[in-house]
Image: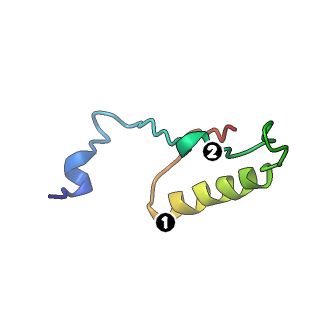
Amino acid sequence: MTQPRQQLISPADTPYYHCVSRCVRRAFLCGSDKVTGQSYEHRRQWLEHRIHLLSSIFAIDICAYAVES
C-alpha cells in the first residue's frame, strides 16, 4: 500500500537525499561507445533539461547532479 510523501520524507531530519539511477545491461548513456563507435553525447543535454523540468513539476530543489557516461 502506498504512503503519502509526508510520511516517507522528513526534511527536518534529513534535508538532502542522494538518488542514483543506472542504465540496465551496461547500456551506453552518454559519450562515445568504444564497441560500436557510436556517439551518444547528444543525450547529455537532453538529460540535463529533463532533470530541471522534473524538479519544477515535482517541486523539489536540486543541489547538485552529475550525468556520467
Q: Which mark is residue 3?
A: none
Label 2 secondary element: loop
The answer to which quarter of the image holds residue 47 is bottom right
Q: Is residue 3 left or right of residue 62?
A: left
Q: Quadrant of the C terminus?
A: top right
Is residue 42 placed above or below 37 in the rendered structure? below
Q: Residue furthest bottom?
A: 57
Residue under pointer 1: 57
Between 60 and 41, the one nearer to me in the picture: 41
Residue 12 percent coordinates (x, y): 29, 38
Q: Nearer the viewer, residue 23 or 55?
A: 23
Mark 2 vs 1, N-terminal side:
2
Rendering coords of residue 65 (x, y %): 60, 40
Quick check: 55 above or below 67?
Answer: below
Q: Is residue 12 left or right of residue 52?
A: left
Task: Give the number of marks.
Answer: 2
Most foreground residue, 18 or 56: 18
Q: Which residue is mark 2?
A: 27
Q: Amino acid at mark 2?
A: Ala
* Rendered residue at 53%/44% (across/down): 24
State the residue at coordinates (67%, 46%): 29
Could you tell me residue 46's position as x and y percent?
A: 70, 58
Q: Is residue 32 left or right of residue 16?
A: right
Left or right: 3 in relation to 65: left
